[in-house]
Image: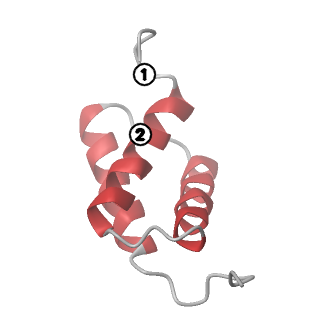
Amino acid sequence: MKPRFCTSPVGVTDAVETAWRTYAMLYDRPDGPTKLALEAYVRGLIIKGERNQDQLTVKALLYLKKREGKVSPGR
């Protein structure tokens, strides 16, 4: 049974902060609600079973790019 709440996050903060800083260096800093959505997204990945810190960070960065419309049309 999957946990209802992610009370013991496996690097949620690390993945979110690393992706946030990397995105801010490459593009403009997203707004506050975007950060909350990113954290919820990463928590969802952990609940689904993702435990690799590097993969969480990469997926978080890709999520930001898609949300902000920075992904090129061919990808």
Mark 2 or 1, nearer chain start: 2
Q: Is residue 37 above or below residue 40?
A: above
Quarter assignment of residue 48: bottom right
| Total marks in image | 2
What is the residue that sits farthest to the top in this orientation?
A: 74
Colour pattern of the rendering: secondary structure
Q: Which of these two is toward me, 61 or 56?
A: 56
Depicted 12 relative to depicted 35: above or below: below
**Dot 2 and dot 1 residues touching (CB under 8 Å):** yes
- Image location of residue 38, percent across then percent down: 54, 54
Is residue 66 toward the left or the right of residue 74 in the image? right
Q: Which residue is mark 2?
A: 62
| Label 1: how many Cα within 10 Å (few below 14, some 14–19, many 20+) | few
* Quadrant housing residue 29: top left
Q: Nearer the viewer, residue 63 or 49?
A: 49
Question: Residue 3: horizontal and vertical position, in percent?
Answer: 69, 84
Q: Position of residue 1 (x, y in %)?
A: 72, 85
How far apart marks 2 and 1 lie (CA) works out to 8 Å
Vertical arrangement, residue 49 with respect to residue 71, above or below: below
Q: Residues within 10 Å of mark 2 (few under 14, many from 20)?
A: some
**For the point 38% across and 45% down, which residue is it?**
61
Residue, far bottom: 8
Query: At 30% across and 52% down in the image, what residue appears?
Result: 21
The kind of residue on which mark 2 rests is Leu
Give percent across and percent down for residue 73. 46, 9
Give residue 71's mark: 1
Q: Amino acid at mark 1?
A: Val
* Residue 35, above or below 13: above
Quarter of the figure that contains the C terminus: top left
Q: Please tell me whether mark 1 sits on a helix, a strand or a loop.
A: loop
